Each structure stands twice: as structure tokens, then as C-alpha cells.
Amino acid sequence: MNIQFKKGALEFLVLLIIQGEDQYGYSLVQKITPRITIAEGTVYPLMRRLVKEGYLTTYFKPSTEGPARKYYRITEEGHERLEALLEEWKAFTEAVDLFIEESERDE
């Protein structure tokens, strides 16, 4: 898959997933990679940025498999950002779909 497509969608995907349930970094990667191949190291800088921008907060939760894990939770600002991204995504994909349909008619 085109790397620019992934970069453009990753913030949106992360917020969508965390909206449903708080996640720690590795669990988030595990939810994404069956459908879109990403490197684990790609997610952590994004998570730090989303926390810095106020879209996510963090907390630590004990783990039975080692040290406590840092979990990410979406904030009210994160919900607002997700709504905006959803609207933008729908408008973008509708426009792309129209171009695809037009090009198929021209063939």
C-alpha cells in the first residue's frame, strides 16, 4: 500500500480505534497491522503528538506480563478532531470515487 496513503490515514485510524476503547501502543499496532502494514515505530511519534495537541491523554495501568503499560484515552478535543477528520475523509473519498467512476466511463 502506498506509504503516503497510510500517513494520511493513520491519525484518523488511531483516533477511531481509541474512541472505542483505551489502548496501549503495542495493542494499537496489533489492531491496525492485520489490515494495513505499519512499523511499530510509526505509531509512537504520532501518539506523542496527539497527546501534545490535547487529543489524547495517558495513564498507566498495571500489567500481569511485566511493567505497567501506558494507555491512551481520547479527550473531548480528540472527539471533535475525529468528527472533523471523518467529515474530511468522507468528502475526500467521495471526490476520489467520482474521479474513478469518470475514468472508467472514459475507457
Image (cartoon, rainbow, N blue to C red):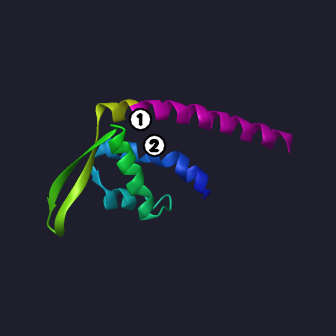
- Residue at image position (60%, 52%) is 4
Q: In this view, does 12 lie to the left or right of 90?
A: left
Q: Mark 1 points at which residue?
A: 82
Q: Position of residue 83 (x, y in %)?
A: 42, 31
Q: How far apart are marks 2 and 1 (CA)?
A: 7 Å
Q: In which quarter of the image is residue 79?
A: top left
Q: Give the range drawn in magenta.
A: 81-107
Q: Residue at x 38, y 56 (%)?
A: 44
Q: Quadrant of residue 52?
A: top left
Q: How many marks?
A: 2
Q: Residue furthest bottom?
A: 65
Q: In this view, does 99 lie to the left or right of 21?
A: right
Q: Are marks 2 and 1 in contact (CB under 8 Å)?
A: yes
Marks 2 and 1, the one that precedes in the sequence: 2
Q: Where is residue 57 in the image (x, y as percent from the top left)?
A: 26, 43
Quadrant of image for the C terminus: top right
Label 1: element kind:
helix
Predominant secondary structure, magenta span: helix
Residue 103 versus residue 70 in the image, above or below: above
Give the label on residue 50, or none.
none
Q: What residue type is labelled 1?
A: Leu
The crowd level at tag 1 (other Cα within 10 Å; few <14, some 14-19, many 20+) is many
Q: Residue 12 carries which label?
A: 2
Residue type beneath disc 2: Phe
Dividing the picture into quadrants, the one containing residue 53 is top left
